[in-house]
Amino acid sequence: MAPDWKFFRSKEEQHGYDAHKTVPGKIWHFLAHEDSALSFIADAIIVILLGKFVILPIFGIALGTAFPLVAVVSSSMDHNGGFDDWWQRHGAWYADRNITKEQFAEFPYTNGFNKGDVFVVKGTNFDDLEVGDVIVYSISSRPDPIIHRIVFIEENFVSTKGDANTNQLDFELEIMEQQLHGKAVARIPLIGWVKVAFVELTN
């Protein structure tokens, strides 16, 4: 039996913009059904706002941190190759500080990570941190949090270093507990490039 095209045309008319008698109905039709650039932009803005002001805060409460998801915006943790090649280039710095190759091989994210990756971050106490942990913390001179590896722990502070950096930066020497947002617990590769592109564009 041939399809009843009059029925489909009638149904389309009934579900068109003018079929909605209330303002909320018209708004819903615009957002959910209208195929236009303006509708797409409005949908994108709503998704961003929901993510920032609803989803992220819920994640933050669940994970115990104000920064539950952090995008990597630099290449300071990129190993640019396998672990053995990276250790040949950088291992002497760690060996001088009593961190052996075998110890480093047991650290989380032994092969580093890439610009554009996103990390799930869990709030943690200072006392629970260990050398080798990848942590997220803030410094006053930068708008985005830092995500680097702990290389030294003292009673009142920790020190970090980017795996790809030749040495520690000044702000890494003494990181206090109030700067800490948490520890990296899961990595999502490359989905943070939207954030990276925005940061590089605004800078």
Image (cartoon, helix red, strand yellow):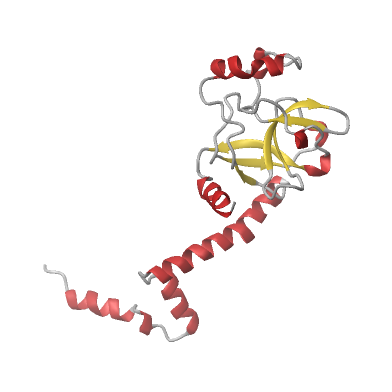
Q: Quadrant of the N terminus?
A: bottom left
Residue located farthest toward the front when viewing the structure as drawn? 203
Which of the pair 169/28 is nearer the observer? Answer: 169
Q: Is residue 6 left or right of residue 170?
A: left
Q: Is residue 34 visible?
A: yes
Where residue 74 appears, as percent x and y from the top left, is: 59, 39
Residue located farthest toward the bottom when viewing the structure as drawn? 21
Q: Say which residue appears at 55% left-offset and 47% top-offset.
A: 196
Which of the pair 199/82 is nearer the observer? Answer: 199
Q: Is residue 196 left or right of residue 132?
A: left
- Whether 128 is drawn above or below 96: the answer is below
Q: Is residue 133 left or right of residue 46?
A: right
Q: Quadrant of residue 50?
A: bottom right
Q: How many marks?
A: 0
Q: Is residue 32 visible?
A: no
Q: Say which residue appears at 50% left-offset and 44% top-offset.
A: 191
Which of the pair 202/13 is nearer the observer? Answer: 202
- Whether 153 is drawn above or below 54: the answer is above
Which of the pair 75/27 is nearer the observer? Answer: 75
Where residue 89 appears, as percent x and y from the top left, is: 59, 17
Where residue 76 appears, as percent x and y from the top left, is: 61, 33
Q: Quadrant of residue 186?
A: top right
- Whether 31 is drawn above or below 44: the answer is below
Where residue 121 appears, as percent x and y from the top left, is: 66, 41
Residue located farthest toward the right when viewing the structure as drawn? 155
Q: Say which residue appears at 16% left-offset and 70% top-offset.
A: 3
